[in-house]
Image (spheres, rainbow, N blue to C red):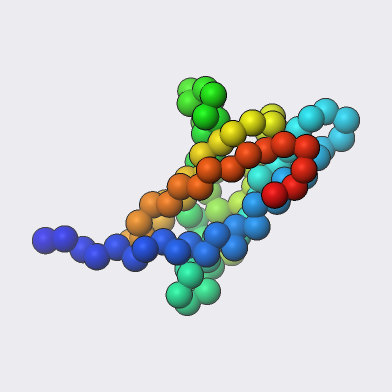
Amino acid sequence: MFEAKKNVGLTLLMVVLLTISGWAQSYTVKGLIRDADTARFLGKTSIKLTPVADTTKARSTSADDKGAFAIVELAPGNYVLSFSYTGYQAQNRNITISNANI
């Protein structure tokens, strides 16, 4: 039997904030993961950030209990940001890290 998975409208209230760290061109991607319908925080969501240029350098983390996450010390470039949570359909977002915030 198939179990219907919620369309992870993981309200990517994922405030994908990119911030410059110090003098080096180092950036951080951080945000909050929530259910789009209920606004419930989805703690322990699995998050993966994969550089388009070199998929062997993917970085993974998990959101904390309140749905917050951060991936630090990132170089400028194009990435695929992936989210997965039990019972939800996985989501992917293309993001670009550059000299400016998204």
Q: Position of residue 37 (x, y in %)?
A: 45, 75
**Left or right: where does residue 28 sit relative to residue 43?**
right
> Which residue extends farthest left?
1
32 is higher (above) or lower (below) than 17: below
Q: Is residue 83 above or below residue 1?
A: above
> In the rendering, at what x and y percent does residue 46 appear?
47, 49
- x 48%, y 62%: residue: 10
Count of numbered tags: 0
Could you tell me which residue is drawn at 41 percent across and 61 percent down?
A: 8
The residue at the far right in this view is 23
Residue 7, image x, y percentages? 37, 63
Position in image of residue 29 (x %, y %):
66, 45
Quarter holding the N terminus is bottom left
Tell me which residue sits at (79%, 30%) in the image.
25
Residue 52 is at least partly visible in this image: yes
Residue 60 in sight from this viewpoint: no
The outermost residue toward the bottom is: 38
Q: In the rendered view, would you say 55 is above or below 90?
A: above
Instruction: Indicate left or right for 52 with 24 as reference.
Output: left
Q: Give me the residue at 64% from left, 31% from top.
A: 77
Identify which residue, 51 or 42, lies in the foreground.
51
* Residue 22 lies in quadrant: top right
